[in-house]
Amino acid sequence: MNKDYYKTIDKTGEGIYKEKGSKFIGFAFHVENEEGAKDLLLQIKKRFHNARHHCYAFRINPENEYFRSSDDGEPSGTAGKPILNQIFSNELFNCMVIVVRYFGGTKLGVSGLIHAYKSAAIEALNNAEQKEQTIYRCLELRFDYSKMNQVMKLIKEENLEVINQMSDMKCIVNIRVKKNDQIKIESKLNLLRDVEFDILINN
């Protein structure tokens, strides 16, 4: 992914699709990691404890993509995959869609199920608010106090965000840098003598 931003869910969306007595309730959430996805699924299962199926898909981390889906007892490929494909179609990351099904007594068949889960996911995503999220890298700078003025001058010139700072004889400053600005900032840091730096985290 070459962009320094990604699309995600800002506010949760909900949608309903009905077919032959069955009701499919879709939810689109923002989620940061797999642990958060598990928590959301537990909340939905508790809220809709009498539903037949709780199918889902999520896609997280635009820098190191990870996705997963579940049919939760529906025929293989009829629920989780159609939900996941809608997340892909919307080019969303850090997004989870859960579709709860109440069985209406009439089987829908493979194509009917695929259409139903897809439709519920579309409704949920259409009713959610989306936003663009900037991808940042966190750099840790290490230097002697005598270099402080030079380092802070660079930070100010490049309008960088300081997220943590420890000043002593040996100073440590953590800064956030936009993904696409990383090479430029590292080149400028390399021009400062006796200033060491490492990438701490991606976020």
Image (cartoon, helix red, strand yellow):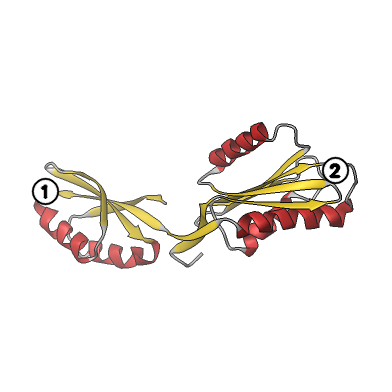
Q: Residue at x 81, y 44 (%)?
A: 74
Q: Is residue 48 above or below residue 165?
A: above
The residue under label 1 is 145
Looking at the rendered image, the disc whose residue lies closer to the viewer, 1 or 2, is 2
Give the distance between the C-alpha atoms of the residues marked 1 and 2, in whole angstroms.
Answer: 71 Å
- Regarding mark 2 in the picture, which secondary structure is present there? loop
Q: Are marks 1 and 2 in contact (CB under 8 Å)?
A: no
In the rendered image, the vertical position of residue 19 relative to residue 181, given as above or below: above
Amino acid on which disc 1 is placed = Tyr
Return the x and y of residue 73 as percentages of the image width and height.
80, 40
**Amino acid type at image mark 2:** Gly
> What residue sits right under mark 2 in the picture?
104
User: Is 196 or 109 nearer to us in this picture?
Assistant: 109
Residue drawn 69% across the image and 35% down it? 48
Question: Is residue 147 visible in this depiction of the protein?
Answer: no
The answer to whether residue 169 is above or below residue 1 is above
| Front residue of 191 and 67 | 67
